[in-house]
Structures are given as C-alpha cells and as structure tokens.
Image (cartoon, grey):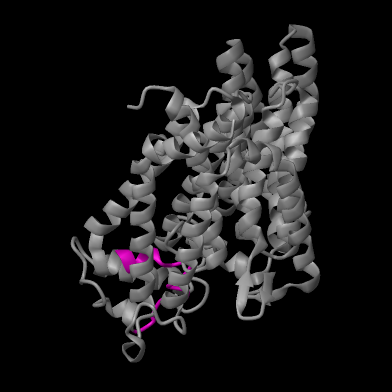
Amino acid sequence: MTGSRNNEGGRLFAGGVDWVSVGIYLLLVLMGWLNIYAAVYDEAHASIFDIGQRYGMQGVWIGVSLFMGLVVLLLDDKYYHILAYPLYGLSLLLLAATLVVGREVNGAKSWIFLGPVALQPAEFVKFTTALALARLMSTYSFSIRKTGDILRICVLLLVPMAIILLQNDTGSAIVYTAFAFVLYREGLNGWLYLAMIMVVSLFVFSFLLSPAFLLVLLIVACTLFQALGNGNWRESLVYVSGVALLTLAFYFLGRAAGWGFTLHGVLLAVSLLSLIPVAIYAYRARLRTVYLYLLLFLGSITFTYMTDFAFGKMQPHQQERILDLFGIENDLQGAGYNVNQSKIAIGSGGLTGKGFLNGTQTKYNFVPEQSTDFIFCTVGEEWGFAGALVVLALFCILILRIMKMGERQMEPFGRIYCYSVAAVFLFHVFVNVGMTIGVMPVIGIPLPFFSYGGSSLISFTLLFFVAVRLDAGKRRELPVD
C-alpha cells in the first residue's frame, strides 16, 4: 500500500499535472510582480528583492505561494473533500474575529495584523467557500431542484457575505455572486437568472430614467410580453390607452384644482388601481400567466423604491462612485479621480506602450492604489494595448482550462469546485479591469496574481492548485489531450 502511494506521487509529477495551466499561472505571477515593481519603483531602492519595498515583499509572498502550491500538489486529493467543512468553519471564525480584533484600512475593518504581516481573512474564505459548496452539492441526496437544498446553498454563501458587509468591505462581499455561474452549470432554473438580469436592469434604469418614464416603461413592457404570450392584443391596447387617458385627465384636473399632483404620482395611483380590473379579467378569461405579470409589475415597482432607500443608506463615497459611473455626476477631482487618471494612463500607452519603467502616470503616482486595485493601468501604460491584450488572453486561456478541468471530473465535487474557481477568477478579472477603464463601479477587488498583497495571492494560488490537484488524478485515468 505504501509503495502504491509513493508510486502515485511519482506519477503526479511525471504526467498527471496540467503543466500548461501551471505555466500560465507562473507567467501571470511573474508579470504581476514586474508590474508592481514598475508601479512603486524607487531609484533609491532599485533591487526587486528589497523587502523594504512592496515589490520585495511581493517576492516573499510569491515564494510562500509557490511553496503552498507544491504542498497542495503533494497531498492526496481526498483530503480536500474531507476538510471542506472544517476549513470553511475555521475561516468563518477567523472572519468573525476580524470584527473584534481587526484593524480598519481604507474604511474597511477587514485586516488582522500579526506583527509586520497583515492578513485579510475575506480573501481566504473564497477558497474555503468553494470547497464547502462543492462538498454540499456533491452529497448523494442533494438536488438543485429541492427548495431545502437551495436554502442550504443560500446560507452557505450568505453567511460570509453578511460578515464581510459588517466589515464594510462591499467589494469582497459582491464576489460571492460569482457562484451563481456554478449553480447555473449545475442546473438551477434559468428563469431565476432572467429575474436577476431584470433586477440589475431595474437598478441601472432607476438612476438613468425619471420615475415617471421608468413606470411607463414597466407598464408597456409587462403588457407587451403578456400579449405576446396570450394573443390578447386588442384588450392590451385598450388597457394601455385607458391608463394613459385616465392619468392625463386626473393630472390636469388636479393641477387646475391646485392640488399639486405630480405626473408620476397620478400614473402610479392609476396603474395600481387598474390592476383590480386586470385581475378580474384574467380570472374570467382563465389567463393564469397574467397573474405572473401582475406580480412582476408590483415587484418591479417595489424594487425601484427599495433601490432609492438602499442608495440613501450607502456611504457617501459609494454613492459618488455609482453616480460617477452612470455619468450623473462627473467629479474628476473627487470620486471620479482614480478612474479618470487610470483611463488617461491606459490611453497614453497606445498600441505598444511607453516601455518598462517609462510610464509617466505610473512614475509620478497620478493614480492612487496603482499597485493594488488599479494595477492594470500600469499594464496599459507601459505595455500598451498589445500587452494588455496578452494579459487578458492569458487570463481567458487559464479560466477556460480550469473549466475543462471541471469537465474532466467524474465526480460532482471536483467539477463544482473547478467551476467555482473559474467563476471567481472571471469575476475578479472582469470587474477589476472594468473599473480601471470606467465601465464598472470601483468596488476595490484585486486583479488575480497582479495586485499587491499576500492574502489575495495565496488565496488565488490555493484556489488554482487545488483545482490542478483534483484534475491530476483524473488525467492519469483519462487520455491526455
């Protein structure tokens, strides 16, 4: 038995590991290290191994990460299934402890300091949550169509999200929405994702459109879609025309009487009252789908008011970032300063960039947080469009290969875990790059393997190498492509 184990370890490095993916990982880590060096380069401390500088410390974290990756590869993959729940529980305790003993950095109480070393437990919980989710969804009795099992998934994901939100680290909490991609892969009802898309659209439209116009859009959309399904075009046209005429009549009568009615208020009252005859019509015509659109309409109206309420409860800097993203406010010296400077840096790089260590926006520190959240603008300025395209291509290839690792798994645990890793990586890359070019809100999440920080680098490394280790066993059983 012992000889068999030793032989298995030897074969692991002989042909089990997906060395192409490991090579891409190493290349991304090296490129990230060079960009951190460029972002905080100091001629007085030119050595990249100077641990007194961020790039020197990142070199230390790279060494620690590579060592942990090696340990992961040497461990039997069964341990990741066994330890999934214990690791998840311990990470939650550490995350909760941050609320008590943690130190606030940039407005978020999410850091624990052990002497000169700062750890961010929220980064590690992504790894343990991926393991726990894979363990939960791979149990024999689990079904994605059971309400009880869906509730268990929600609890597993919402507990760390809630604790992270209490730390005032909204960006790290939003990352957990990436697991929705995994649930879709495992067969969760697609209508739920359509509902989520509608929620996001309503959130955006609530900022871009006037309340009255948004309400008109909801009435027309719900009426149109139910007419497409039921074919009652004449009744639908009568309904929309009636709501429009009654709204205008009451609005002008109210204004003439000096009651101070607003168009939005009158339209809201008329549309809500009109739901009563619509419900009676649906009952008599036996059109059950109409009830679904009635609920959708009421839910949409409720959500828009909840959006206004939630927006009012946000921190001022969060409100400013959202308004700046949608172009409602354009404060280039305030909330929009970072993004504006980032876009200038990326745009100034042109096709091939200004060259390594020659970025003026980078050299003169025009972009805050350039070695962490905004590291991608260093890529754009010094390596240009071509270099940025290479970086994004490497990320895409790596994510696709991790998904392929999941498809090679013959057990749900490995497949779900690999897709969780791919989803987390995709979310981080999409949002981080998006916020540096001004198409996503600034929520402060790192670019994998590029942004400075030991916690994020170790977490991403663990996520990646456990996927590689789970895949290694299957590659020894299946033909290698």
Q: Is residue 371 magenta?
A: yes
Kindly tell me whether residue 445 is visible in this rendering.
Answer: no
Residue depicted at x 43% and y 55%: 434
Q: For the C terminus, which image quadrant?
A: top left
Residue that lies at the very extreme toward the left in this rendered image:
352
The residue stretch that appears in magenta: 364-379
Horizontal and vertical percent for residue 386? Answer: 22, 56
Residue depicted at x 78% and y 57%: 93
The quadrant holding residue 170 is: bottom right
User: Residue 99 versus residue 468: which sits nearer the camera?
Assistant: 468
User: Residue 430 versus residue 372: which sits nearer the camera?
Assistant: 372
Indicate whether 250 appears above or below 416. Answer: below
The quadrant holding residue 115 is: bottom right
User: Residue 1 versus residue 143: which sits nearer the camera?
Assistant: 1
Q: Is residue 206 magenta?
A: no
Horizontally, is 241 left or right of 47 in the view?
right
Horizontally, is 297 left or right of 326 in the view?
right
Horizontal and vertical percent for residue 148? Answer: 80, 27
Kindly tell me whether residue 299 is visible in this rendering.
Answer: yes
